[in-house]
Image (cartoon, rainbow, N blue to C red):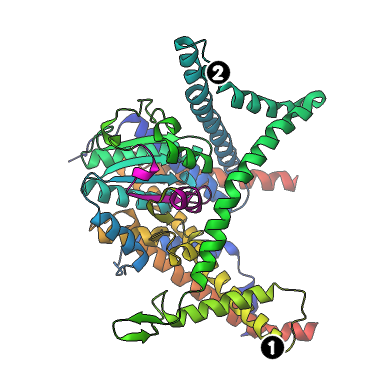
Amino acid sequence: MKDFARRMIGIDRRIIFLLIAAAVLLPLLRPFGLPIKISPEVRAVYDYIEALPERSVFLLSFDFDPSSKPELEPQAVALLRHAFRKNLRVIGMTHWLTGTGLADDIFSRVAAEMGRERGKDYVFLGWSPGAGSLVIAMGQDLYKAFPSDYQKTPTQGMPVLEGVKSLRDVNYMVSLAAGNPGIEMWYVFGKDKYRFEMAGGSTGVIAPGLYPFLRSGQINGLIGGLQGAAEYETLIKRKGTATAGMDAQSATHFVIIVLVFLCNVFYFVLRGEEGKSN
Amino acid sequence: MPGPVLPTETLLGAWVAAGLTLFIYSFLYKDNPLFKLGEHLYVGISVGYSVVLAWHTVFLRLLWEPVKKDIIENPAALGSYVLLIPAVLGLLMWARFIPKIAWLSRLAFAFVVGFGSGVAIPRAVSSYILKQIEDTVNPLVIRGADGLSMGFNLASPQSGVNTIVLVIGVVSVLFYFFFSVEHTGPGRVTARTGIYFLMIAFGAAFGYTVMSRMSLLIGRFSDLIKYASAEYGYAALVLLALTVLALAAWEMASRGRHAV
């Protein structure tokens, strides 16, 4: 037993990589359709958007870049599909310079799929420097903060922005964030000052740190990681890449739990031996 | 029946994306020139993209175009020149590269630090401290139609029992980081409780991190599976074969060099 444990503890790490790769690949090629349970924090975002009247103003901030695409793109797609289906006016923007092209691509793709028109049903403002200062500027005058959109079309007079002067006229906002600037910054400089309701969508890494804000009501909902995106896809009854990835996610978690358990067993088997050698 | 032919830029993008993904993952075997190529391309392209976008957005859209327009329309008005003040402050930051006038950059940094602190401190105190303290001292019992009641539902964040757990957690963790008193007797129990709360928090954070990293892996594998289809010219499969061959050749060449 000890020999086996010693061999296993010193196993080539590349074998573990292969195990994880297999746990990802097999469910992606042959999904087994595990059920997806909806959490209250994701349902809260869905319910709020569902309750908004038509042509309400929905602000979606793409605060991520391509390195977080697998987690946050499915969230963005699901939220945009829901907003366009509800016939909301959608304003998009980003605080992450390197995410601008990706955000515009997602916006244009989903809008085209849902038959929505740029300038009339949605606008992508692009990136502007300042983060917190930019949010304050948007709270004072949206048109001074963004004189033109990403396509260089002047924002003043755009049908989609009719009646919108500042952040105070936004009915709901969601920040999809991979870090800072993101959800916390939007709360601190935006919601707390200009009093609009907001929620967050985040990568799994930063999600635990956002739960205190959820509990205190500083954000009214939270979509966390690929799991959150899959839950949202289930709610809007439109399966996408997040739902497709959930089986693989469960399989990899299962493999990791088994490996952690085995590693502990081998460690305890060899612990006495280490004591003797010392 | 064959599907519609994809545009050239989409096909090219798929081949580049699949190739670079495989190059980066080749590091799992060991550090190699393909990984280095992918890594350097990533850094270079990110910086290049950022510089171009910042130039167009910050300099052209927010400074050059409005100043030019205002000066042409109303050259006599002082307001037409107001944007030149932040522009000059921005230029002063570059003075750091010239030792003789490096002190000028302090003016710009003083402005940034002063303005940033003034804007951030009140908002941070309100959002991170006051709101969080307010939520920590929730009422234990609630007056409802049936009189006073206390919630015992663990799944509800606002229930009385969770309020007790929250208060115990906050106090014990704060006490754990209070080093002016020796942690003995009841203090030791409190500090130990704080450690347990911290361990649960670290465990939750680590679990979410694992989930997040696996999601990224799933995302890349999903794309590779998509790019392995006939529609994309079997890009992922062809490039996987080429990557393996290149690694094998590099490995043999390295061994040959070491043997010599």
Q: Is residue A95 visible?
A: no
* Three-letter residue code for mark 1: Pro
Q: Position of residue B98 (x, y in %)?
A: 77, 24
Chain letter, disc 2 residue: B
Q: In the rendered view, would you say B62 is above or below B192?
A: above
Give the residues in magenta. Answer: A165-193
| Above or below, comparing residue B189 to residue B78 in the picture | below
> Residue A16 shows which numbered tag?
none
- Which one is nearer the viewer's eye here, B46 or A83? A83
Find residue B90 and report its image quarter.
top right
Q: Mark 1 points at which residue?
A: B186
Q: Which amino acid does label 2 sit on?
A: Tyr
- Quadrant location, the N terminus of chain B: top left
Q: How many labels does the image show?
A: 2
Q: Left of B147 or right of it: where is A114?
A: left
Residue underneath mark 2: B81
Q: Quadrant of residue A92?
A: top left
In this picture, is B175 found above or below B184?
Answer: above
Quadrant in the picture for the C terminus of chain B: top right
- Look at the image and tell me whether residue B189 can be seen: yes
B125 lies left or right of A89: right
Q: Looking at the image, which is closer to me, B106 or A39?
A: B106
- Camera-side residue: B135 or A33? B135
Seen from this angle, which residue lies furthest bottom? B185
Name the spot of residue A189 as percent of width and height, x first.
50, 48
Q: What element carries label 1?
A: helix
Q: Is residue A84 magenta?
A: no
